[in-house]
Amino acid sequence: MSKTSRIAVGILGASGYTGAELVRLLARHPDVDLRVLTADRQAGKPMAEVFPHLAMLALPLLTKIDDVDWTNSGLDIVFCALPHGTTQEVVARILTASAGAPRRLRIIDLSADFRLHDVATYAQWYGHEHRAPDLQKEAVYGLTEFMREEIRRARLVACPGCYPTTSLLPLVPLLRARQIDPDDIIIDAKSGVSGAGREAKQGSLYAEVGEGIHAYGVASHRHGPEIEQELSRAAGGAVVVNFTPHLMPMNRGILASIYVRLINGATADDLRATLTRAYADEPFVQVVPAGVSPATRHVRGSNHCLIGVFPDRVKGRAIVLSTLDNLVKGASGQAIQNMNLMCQLPEARSLEQLPLFP
């Protein structure tokens, strides 16, 4: 930590949605000093020009990554909110440049670049060889509720994707409890448009998204192998799921409807009881009462995940609903949870805000 006892933080990719969300949440963190904000195409501009909703904050100017003196930056934590495929080389370069610094720089990556443990699987799904395989070996998967001790010790944390976080939080405890069939899991998930990032692209245009809903990445979405990787770890054997994402005409939020087959005599009430016990002491995961259907509007702007369980009308099956804000618990909020752990701070610090409703 810095001499002022505050955490010196840099955010790479501060001009994107998750970068701006990191700034919004960290600006009032009592232990954080925002020192470096990068955005290569917006370099030289104030954040207030790129994001007017942050105009009241005193922030450093945006700069290019290559213009940061990583050897003498004095940074303790760097959040990487860069596009997939670009982070590996950047992180390797930063860690090499800062190797001689008196403190150990630690990286929290919000991209998919270090999430998949197997570099061959990464190459298969992302279309190129992993560019930092040695770093991949030490990366810790940052699903906070299940990896706290590993995260506290990590130098490089790979934060989960938004769809995986929404799916894994309800499914991991149920697989560990051997209450659902690992060979019969269907995840039908719907996300707001901000999950596609801020870069202009045809699929995110208003006329393409408004007044409708459509599936995308059918049987080919890159979050599929990430979900299967962590479910396989929980089940103690290979798990393959049916996962289909959909794009909704809304800015924020994810809702996953998860269909499971019950085993070992379990009922929907048993599933709810298991999840209630698993998250009884968790600050950001709540199981709603029987009959209550969690919705994206119930978590908007917060770091919370709500989970509901319903018996299916088909005997021996249940429906699990999970919802969160894709930009907060699905990205920047979870990243800050991990930073708090890495810096021995209260995990919920700067994340206490309640959801915005309506």
Image: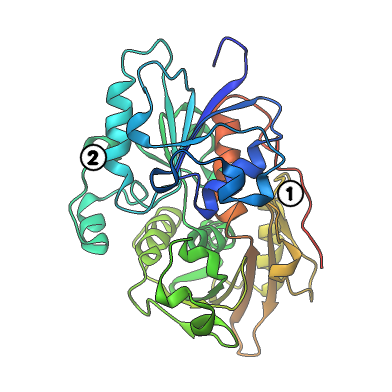
Q: Which mark is residue 47?
A: none
Residue 30: horizontal and vertical position, in percent? Answer: 71, 27
Nearest to the observer: residue 76 or residue 221: 76
Q: Secondary structure at mark 2?
A: loop
Position above or below: 172 against 64: below
Residue at the image point whose x is 51% and y is 64% from the top: 195
Q: Is residue 285 visible?
A: yes
Query: In which quadrant of the rendered view does residue 287 lie?
Result: bottom right
Q: Is residue 60 left or right of residue 12?
A: right
Residue at the image point whose x is 41% and y is 19% from the top: 104
The amino acid on which the numbered mark 1 sits, given as a three-letter code, is Ala
Residue 263: horizontal and vertical position, in percent? Answer: 54, 73
Query: In which quadrant of the rendered view does residue 344 lie?
Result: top right
Task: Determine which residue is flagged by label 2.
Answer: 132
Residue at the image point whose x is 37% and y is 13% from the top: 101
Residue at the image point whose x is 34% and y is 20% from the top: 98
Nearest to the observer: residue 355 or residue 169: 355
Q: Secondary structure at mark 1?
A: loop
Specify the color scheme.
rainbow
Task: Determine which residue is flagged by label 1.
Answer: 280
Q: Is residue 145 visible?
A: no
Nearest to the observer: residue 138 or residue 11: 11
Q: Are marks 1 and 2 in contact (CB under 8 Å)?
A: no
User: Quarter of the image containing the C terminus?
Assistant: bottom right
The CA distance from mark 1 to mark 2 is 38 Å
The amino acid on which the numbered mark 2 sits, given as a three-letter code, is Ala
Around disc 1, counting alpha carbons within 10 Å, would you say few (fewer than 14), some (14 to 19), or many (20 or more)? few
Residue 347: horizontal and vertical position, in percent? Answer: 66, 35
Around disc 2, counting alpha carbons within 10 Å, would you say few (fewer than 14), some (14 to 19), or many (20 or more)? some
Of the residues tagged 1 and 2, which is closer to the observer? 2
The numbered mark, 1 or 2, whose residue comes first in the sequence reads 2
